[in-house]
Amino acid sequence: MPLAVCATPIGNLEDVTLRVLRELDEADLVLCEDTRHTRALLERHGIGTQAQSYHRHNEAARTAAVLPRLEAGERIALVSDAGLPGINDPGAHLIAASLAAGIPVTVLPGPSAVETALVASGLAGERFQFLGYLPRGEKAQRTLWQELESWAHPAVAFESPRRLPATLRTLAEGAR
């Protein structure tokens, strides 16, 4: 069985594809960042599959434990708390290890915070730059703002809600 990399809702638990729901229901195991968060999604859709944590603090050990199970034919799904694993979330390590071991990887697409932000902005989306999470600290952010001033296309970034007010202040000051 291939490793199933499943996109999860980015805010509304109903924003999940039927294909992802079927994969989560039929999987032997769901690997996830936070079992409490994923359990809410699974319970909302009546899915009883076991969920096990897979995050930056345990991904090396968990990958080593899961690869033999994938090689033995177990059906394993990988999810993040919101969006697609491997995009600013744990998952790339397991995906790369699976491919290196000759285990196929299937990606089940779904909601994208990057594309949602770009569409909601009203800016042309033919070309854009994804920055991932913004750097911490005023100095690093000011350097980034200066770099972005010369870009001709929109940039999309992630930021923690807790840090957003300070980041917006730094951006506003940098734009003066």
Image: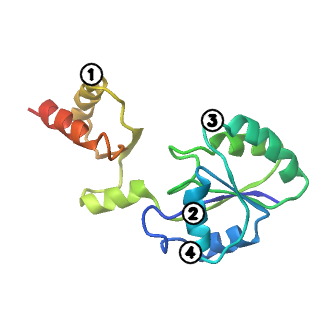
Q: SS for tag 1?
A: helix
Farthest-out residue, right: 72
Q: Residue at x 29, y 46 (%)?
A: 154
Q: Is residue 13 above or below residue 53?
A: below
Instruction: Check disc 4 and report its element: helix, strand or loop.
Output: helix
Q: Tell me the amino acid under the disc marked 1.
A: Lys
Mark 4–mark 3 distance (CA, rounded to whole Å): 27 Å
On-image quarter of the N terminus: bottom right
Q: Quadrant of residue 39?
A: bottom right
Q: Tag 3's secondary structure?
A: loop
Amino acid type at image mark 4: Arg
* Depth order, front residue of 148/30: 30
Q: Quadrant of residue 17?
A: bottom right
- Asked if marks 4 and 3 touch (Cβ < 8 Å), the reply is no
> Dot 2 lies on which element?
loop
State the mark number for residue 139.
1
**4 or 3: tag closer to the N-terminus:** 4
Badge 1: residue crowd in 10 Å (few <14, some 14–19, many ≥20)? few
Q: Which residue position holds label 4? A: 44
- Give the mark nearer the N terminus: 1 vs 4: 4
Spatial distance from mark 2 to mark 1, Cα to Cα? Answer: 36 Å
Q: Position of residue 155 (x, y in %)?
A: 32, 44
